[in-house]
Amino acid sequence: MSILFNEKTRTFHLCNDSVSYIMTVLESGQMAQLYFGKRIHHSEDFSHFLEFAFRPMTSYLFDDDYKYTLEHISQEYGVYGSTDFRDPAAEVTGKDGGRILDFQYQGYAIEKGKPSLPGLPATYTEDDSEAETLTLFLKDPVNGLALKLFYTIFSDGGIIARSAAFVNEGDDTLHLTRAMSLCMDLPDCDYEFVHFSGAWGRERHLKTRRLEQGIQSVGSVRGHSSHNHNPFVILKRTDATEFQGEAIGFSLIYSGNFLAQAEVSTHNETRLLLGIHPHWFDWKLAPDQSFQTPEAVMVYSDKGLNHMSQTFHRLYQMRLARGYWKDKARPILINNWEATYFDFTEERLVNIATKAMACGVELFVLDDGWFGGRRHEKAGLGDWIANPELLPDGITGLAQKIEDIGMKFGLWFEPEMVNKDSDLYRKHPDWILKTPERSASHGRFQYVLDFSRKEVVDCIYEMMAKILGEAKVSYVKWDMNRSITECYSAALPADRQGEVFHRYILGVYDLYERLTSRFPQVLFESCASGGARFDPGLLYYAPQGWTSDDSDAVERLKIQYGTSYCYPVSCMGSHVSVTPNHQVYRNTPLHTRANVAYFGTFGYELDLNKLTEEEQEEVKAQISFMKQYRRLFQFGTFYRLKSPFDGDGTTSWMVVSEDKKEAIVGVYKVLNGANMPFTRISLKGLDPGICYELSSDRRGHYGDELMNAGLITTDSSVGEMAMGNIPTCDFDSRLFILKAIN
Ligand code: DGJ
């Protein structure tokens, strides 16, 4: 890995074994993008990538010049208003109302490692040899706005992390109304735009559309990254597949409003923008004040989508998630939410825990309803004190009882919210986000606390820290169950209201930072009505997140498959729940529910007392199986093999251990059929020369056979005699375990 700079041509080349990222200073002073893709040889001069032409109806920067039009030059951080007409990376309004920006190159710095971003989550290095960072210094000569562009190249993988920082070095106050984390101009448009969209209960479904001239985008203006879209998109070549071809993943390490946009010009150049959504964003920059954007990560792969995903998985597991739990196998938990909802007593909770303990579960999680006057959705949020009628010995007492049974104890909070029927709201009605003289809309009868205010965050911190400090709490589920409306902070002046959405998220990060550093051994799981804030920003603080409220095994195939494009298995909260399922009322076999949930953090969301004895035995076997293989599931290399979004209704994925001596393949089908074809799946990532014992036939098969001829997955839907006449059914599934034979 190196960052090379040629003084003469003023060209930067960031490269490692996988990628090259090349840019240059234009004669006109702006930074131009020359190349991003597979590693190419270094050259003293890449200026031939800059092509110029005289075109009618084009504007040029200099008198007597028909070269310098920014419209047809790939920009590092494009701005609108002079000669570039594409959507810009930044926008600003000056004192006189002028909006022109011109970021002129001033110089650069190269440092080993990677500096952190104050107050923001970001990837990091543990050793300076893991990465190098280039900072480009630019400045607008008229309004004095300085811009720093940060580029970190990691030693391994096609990863470039980027962000931008603005400092007002001028004399007048400026308003920054757009500040993207990344602007990436690519020379052609032969790409598909892949994004992950959905809604509550069906998050991160894979969507693919061909890039066309014009703008396509996804984003969120809900105050959180949202169920609807994820701050992750891919540009893939139209012929790229899971296992071959070029793809670039763009991921924003941020949990608030975001925009991911691809614009194709009518000359077929593509501009990808990623960052905070400019809608309602207006950051006042008085002289000497600065603004740092969130970080965006680009991963280039020339070996298809799986390779791109695996690069994200390793980076986010090891150099985004932090702390004690980031690389530890996760405890198998039981959560009482779907078992009881609000209808519980301490005795009932202890009963659930006792049975779970007997089955081998390690952690009991008490969900919503334990605090203040919270016996239903209309009261209690904000009062983080145990309800003495429910828990006579408080959280401390219950946690001790659970520990005495032999399990760890976990607790649910929804720190950012308040019900009007709460002591906190009665004391501080002005602490919610609400526009003056307008009504405040509710979501689930709750209102959003103004986390842009330090005193609000301090108050919630004190309440939570008291409980975590006094009681034996090993795990926290941090929930967030509504979008932000009527966004306005009573504590900020009129000309700073455009800052509230971002300041809110900074407040959330601040609370996470304080709690995770004071309680480093506590495992945090993020949640937002399931997966409404399943983003890399929260992964920095909470190494796992509740993937979706939809715990139906069939629904989860799409949700977890889609999620896997960016996020590792170790961060996907996945539980076995009852049938009929509470979200879709489907009956799926117990083994299929577990076979899906194993590819995640694994746990149960039900009362095991209510299962038959036979089912309880099955659960015990599942738990002991997961204990044996959880490291492999959660930290092995994950491959998507067959997509639930297309094909014949079969889904398949697999994990392979780092030494390639063990692997587990999951095969899932939706509907059963009669007289069906024989089936095989080509496995991936095995060692061709290793002979593996296969759990389905107890015979040895070489890796090359399994990867080329394929694994036989035929089941009894083909007719009699297959699979030893074991009948198969709708929603059936199988795991195949492969172990190297010594
Ligand atoms: C939404 C979460 O996603 C659920 O798991 C549960 O914690 C409820 N909130 C509790 O209100």
Image (tube, rainbow, N blue to C red):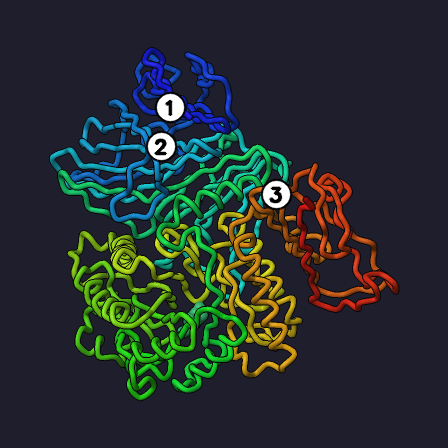
Task: Name the spot of residue 11 as percent of width and height, x first.
Answer: 37, 18
Q: Which amino acid does label 3 sit on?
A: Lys
Ligand 1 quadrant? bottom left
Residue type marked 1? Ile
Badge 1 or badge 3: first in the primary sequence = 1
Residues tagged 2 and 1 counted as in contact (Cβ below 8 A): yes
Q: Quadrant of the N terminus?
A: top left
Image position, residue 688 (x, y; %): 69, 37
Q: Is residue 425 above or below residue 519?
A: below
To which residue does mark 2 refer?
151
Q: Are the two marked residues, 1 and 3, in contact with CB atoms closer than 8 angstroms? A: no
SS state under label 2: strand
Q: Residue furthest front?
A: 742
The label shown at residue 207 is none
- What is the spatial separation of the Cα atoms under label 3 and label 2, in whole angstroms? 34 Å
N-term mark: 2 or 1: 1
Task: Indicate which disc, 3 or 2, sits on the residue closer to the N terminus.
Answer: 2
Residue 660 - label: 3
Query: Which secondary structure lies at badge 1?
Result: strand
Asked which quadrant contains residue 68, the reply is top left
The amino acid type found where label 2 is placed reads: Tyr
